[in-house]
Image (cartoon, grey):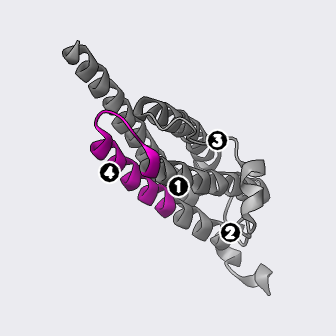
Amino acid sequence: MKEEINKKGVSILSLDVQKLIDMLNAALSEEWLAYYQYWIGAQLVEGPMRAEVEAELLQHATEELGHADLVAKRIIELNGTPVLNPLEWSKLARCKYEAPEDPYVETILAQNIRGERCAIQRYQEIAAYTDKADYVTHKLAVQILGDEVEHEKDLDDFVVDISLLKKALK
């Protein structure tokens, strides 16, 4: 029965659908890890501009959760199954979770910047793979890629602001 679902929507694609599902499941795993990375970092962050950084981290967490929802829905549209077991997330993810053992704001920001740069690479690859072959997934990848680029800039801006604050206090 599952093969009949979205048969036309999948048959028009000119790419390896299983490879795409695998790429999307890796991205889905990374989104869940990014969500937790942001959320737990927001709970623990300490240091200058703490309140502002905490609010930004929580906003990013919400957006990463939204990305996970979009990616999971696209996997289902492709007749795939989203990764079912959270224990698989770390195995599938290239963008790794970094436990915020040092809650200092600059450390938390650096960890999340690394995660965003990895996510940018992931969605760039999905966008390139689906370009002119799967318009729906391509549009989704480009949309999320834009969000990830914005997240990187937001975090980089905090790093600059904290650096300037530290210089002004000297």
Disc 4 marks a residue whose amino acid type is: Ala
Disc 1 or disc 4, which is closer to the eye? 4
Q: Position of residue 160 (x, y in %)?
A: 31, 24
What separation in Å lies between label 2 and label 1 (alpha carbons)?
24 Å
Q: State the extent of the magenta-drawn residues as a range.
A: 43-66
Membership of 24 in magenta stretch: no
Disc 2 or disc 3, which is closer to the eye? 3
First-in-chain label (1 vs 4): 1
Question: Could you say whether the residue bearing mark 3 is in a helix, strand or loop?
Answer: loop
- Disc number placed over residue 35 in the picture, else none: 1
**Image quarter in which the N terminus is found:** bottom right
Q: Which residue is mark 4?
A: 55
What separation in Å lies between label 4 and label 2 (alpha carbons)?
35 Å
Q: Position of residue 148 (x, y in %)?
A: 46, 44
Graded by Cα atoms within 10 Å as few (under 14), some (14 to 19) or many (20 or more), the crowding at tag 4 reads few
Q: Nearer the viewer, residue 94 or 4?
A: 94
- Circles 2 and 1, Cβ within 8 Å, touching? The answer is no
Disc 2 marks a residue whose amino acid type is: Leu
The residue at 35%/34% (across/down) is: 47
Graded by Cα atoms within 10 Å as few (under 14), some (14 to 19) or many (20 or more), the crowding at tag 1 reads many
Relative to 108, 79 lies left or right? right
Q: Which residue is mark 3?
A: 95
Position of residue 105 relative to residue 54, above or below, is above
- Residue 138 visible somewhere in the drawing: no
First-in-chain label (3 vs 4): 4
The residue at 37%/41% (across/down) is: 150
- Disc number placed over residue 78 in the picture, else none: 2
- Circles 4 and 2, Cβ within 8 Å, touching? The answer is no
Disc 3 marks a residue whose amino acid type is: Cys
